[in-house]
Amino acid sequence: MSPLLSTTDLRVAFPVGGGLFSKPKLVRAVDGISLDVHAGETLAVVGESGCGKTTLGRTLAMLQRPTSGSITFDDARLDQLGPRDLRAARRSMQMIFQDPYASLNPRQRIAAIVAEPLLIAGVGAASVNIRVAELLDLVGLGAEAGARLPRAFSGGQRQRIGIARALAASPKLIICDEPLSALDVSIQAQIVNLLVRLQRQFGLTYVFISHDLAVVRQMASRVAVMYLGVIVELADVDALFARPRHPYTTALLSAVPTLAVRNQPAAKPLLVAGDPPSPLNRPAGCRFHPRCWLRKQLDNPSRCTSEEPKLVGPDTQRVACHFSEEAAMQPRTGANEPAAAGLS
């Protein structure tokens, strides 16, 4: 069965600087990503801030035009569609934004916010009112919330409004751009449970962008680990958490908080030195090599500095590392049982 969403060598670059006598440099936020998203699954995208996760999500939704490469959604090439056809395609593809405060128009009432995708799609006014009431009930707010302004709601309630808006046109795919990062932990659990319930009820497909690996383990079918614009590991969630094969993935998982055990010392995470390199001047060879803890243990790491690894391996776990087997054999600390308390 063909994937619902597919990208091939997707690239997004932003010009920076430049002037009358100099050319601008390029920030390659997404630098050659090829992946498939199948109907009904949740593909999580994780990585440090600045790795390109949000740019990837916005590009998949065509809120950002790709510099090159292709995006195929439901057998249509989104990057080749004109404005009218793209608007029609967006009925089946919606987005939940990171900031529940900035993503809602403060001057519009909630009913108008949720109704907007329906009106753009040409749904009649009478049907719109019925659908808005259904959606607000579905996300746990009640139809009476439609008469109020966004300022009357908390952050968690505003995110529920954003979810209702995303569901309005009955999409097949929802791109969730860190929908939990601005919420309290207790509210995060409620939103996660809501997203899981809606996926089961409507057969939704999610691209779930997140920093929280505990939530990712709870929700995802597969995980794509991004670093400096590329995917360095793409694996089924169970395989990734059980035996990560990229040193960067291992470091991310070891940093997940764990439940303390009485009379036992706390596990020490693997430390990744320094900050990610500038995308304006990325390292030669493997992009992670200046910070790689495994490279320091190798007898001959010259390949890391001269040759960029390709994303290879079986579909269940693909990795871009010259020494993935050595990375998989390393002991990990702090990553075996991510703290997912409160999520059910």
Image (spheres, rainbow, N blue to C red):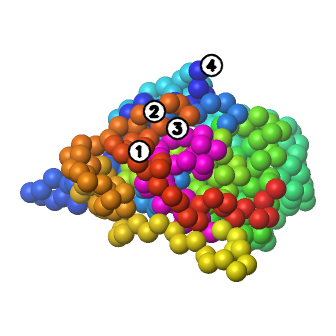
Q: CA distance from mark 1 to mark 2?
A: 10 Å
For label 3, the crowd category at 10 Å Cα-Cα, with few meaning under 14, some 14 to 19 and many 20 or more, is many
Q: CA distance from mark 4 to mark 1?
A: 30 Å
| Residue occupied by mark 2 | 313
Dot 1 amino acid type: Ser
Is 237 one of the magenta-colored residues?
Answer: yes
Measuring from the top left, give residue 139's x and y in whole percent.
Answer: 83, 53
Residue 247 image-quadrant placement: bottom left
Q: Are marks 2 and 3 in contact (CB under 8 Å)?
A: yes
| Residue occupied by mark 3 | 317
Which-is-in-front pick, marks 1 and 3? 1
Measuring from the top left, give residue 195's x and y in whole percent.
Answer: 75, 49
Front residue (pair 139, 104): 139
For label 2, the crowd category at 10 Å Cα-Cα, with few meaning under 14, some 14 to 19 and many 20 or more, is few
Secondary structure of residue under mark 1: helix
Measuring from the top left, give residue 217's x and y in whole percent.
Answer: 66, 52
Residue 99 image-quadrant placement: bottom right
Measuring from the top left, give residue 267's x and y in whole percent.
Answer: 58, 71
Dot 2 amino acid type: Gly
| Residue occupied by mark 4 | 1
Q: Are marks 1 and 2 in contact (CB under 8 Å)?
A: yes
Is residue 273 depicted above or below 36 in this figure? below
Tell which circle, 4 or 3, labels the residue nearer the N-terminal end. Answer: 4
Please state the extent of the stretch shown in magenta in the rendering.
Answer: 230-257
Residue 84 image-quadrant placement: top right
For label 4, the crowd category at 10 Å Cα-Cα, with few meaning under 14, some 14 to 19 and many 20 or more, is few
Q: Residue at x 48, y 60 (%)?
A: 251
Q: CA distance from mark 2 to mark 3?
A: 6 Å
Q: Is residue 262 left or right of residue 285?
A: right
Q: CA distance from mark 4 to mark 3?
A: 20 Å
